[in-house]
Amino acid sequence: MAHPLRASYPFPERRELVGEYVTLTPCDPARDSAQLFEEANGSETARALWEFMYFGPFESIASFEDYLSAIHADPKALPFTVRRNTDGKAIGQNCLLAIETLHGRAELGSIWYLPEAQRTPANTEACFLLLCHLFDDLGYRRAEWKCDNQNKRSFAAAERLGFTFEGTFRQHAIRKGINRDTAWLSIIDSEWPQVKEQLAALLRR
């Protein structure tokens, strides 16, 4: 059941979000670029992480830090570094973007993980923690997921997480000099209890 409408909604908190497998820490560009740069850009496998992103791969730690700093400085964004709980290692990034406190909505985006963290519970739990914060802590009405229409892995991940496909925005953007048609997906507050139960079950497997 949807929550009653409010005049405005709180901005998401800049604090750690702790799960069983990963902890999300608010991004510190200087610290986190030093920890992530080489493994996120130092091999062909790692460089493939950036294929569908607007930026990257990066040729220097300075340019990588600039990328993290730009998200950090966006007043409608809250970037998190994802850390593995077993050893505290930084393994990727997950962000809240396009945060609209007037309407109670935010996007999960700029998501990427080091090759060693892919196909592990890291992304599922990181997204679960962010969705819990949005819907349970802050009472948000809507969470969004947008991806390049050619990015089949991202689209499949969104559906696996419980997002519903809403449509494709044709010629929505330009990515590295080529056209990007953007797929839009969402979870709304009335759907969240069932999605939350499904995600919790997925993490228990």
Image: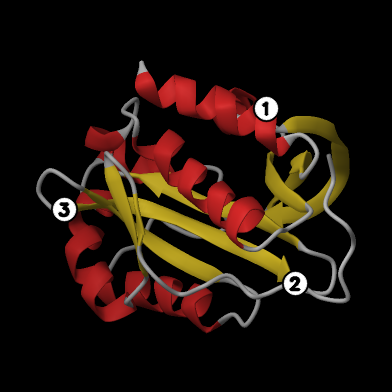
Quarter-of-image position of residue 68: bottom left
Confirm whether residue 53 shows in the render: no
Badge 2: how crowded within 10 Å, few (<14), some, or many (20+)? some
Mark 3 residue type: Lys
Q: Residue at x 39, y 55 (%)?
A: 93
Identified by mark 2, the residue type is Tyr
Dot 1 or dot 2, earlier in sequence: 2
Asked whether 132 or 76 is in front, the reply is 132
Identify the mark nearer the N-term, 2 or 3.
2
Cα distance in 3D space between marks 2 and 3? 33 Å
Say left or right for 154 vs 98: left
Secondary element under disc 1, as helix, strand or loop, is: helix
Residue behind mark 3: 89
Quarter containing the N terminus: top right
Q: Which one is closest to the eye, mark 1 or mark 3?
A: 1
- The Cα atoms of the two marked residues, 1 and 3, are separated by 32 Å
Instruction: Compute the Cα span from label 1 to label 2.
Output: 22 Å
Q: Residues within 10 Å of mark 1 (few under 14, many from 20)?
A: few
Identified at 52% across, 52% down, the residue is: 130
Q: Residue at x 76, y 34 (%)?
A: 191
Marks 1 and 3 close (CB-CB < 8 Å): no
SS for callout 2: loop
Marks 2, 3: nearer the viewer: 2
Residue highlighted by disc 1 = 194
In the displayed structure, would residue 56 be above or below residue 131?
A: below
Can you give x and y, in whole percent of width and height, for residue 33 in the image? Answer: 27, 69
Looking at marks 1 and 3 on the same chain, the residue that comes earlier in the sequence is marked by 3
- The residue under label 2 is 9
Decide: few, some or many residues near mark 3? Use Cα within 10 Å; few <14, some 14-19, many ≥20.
some
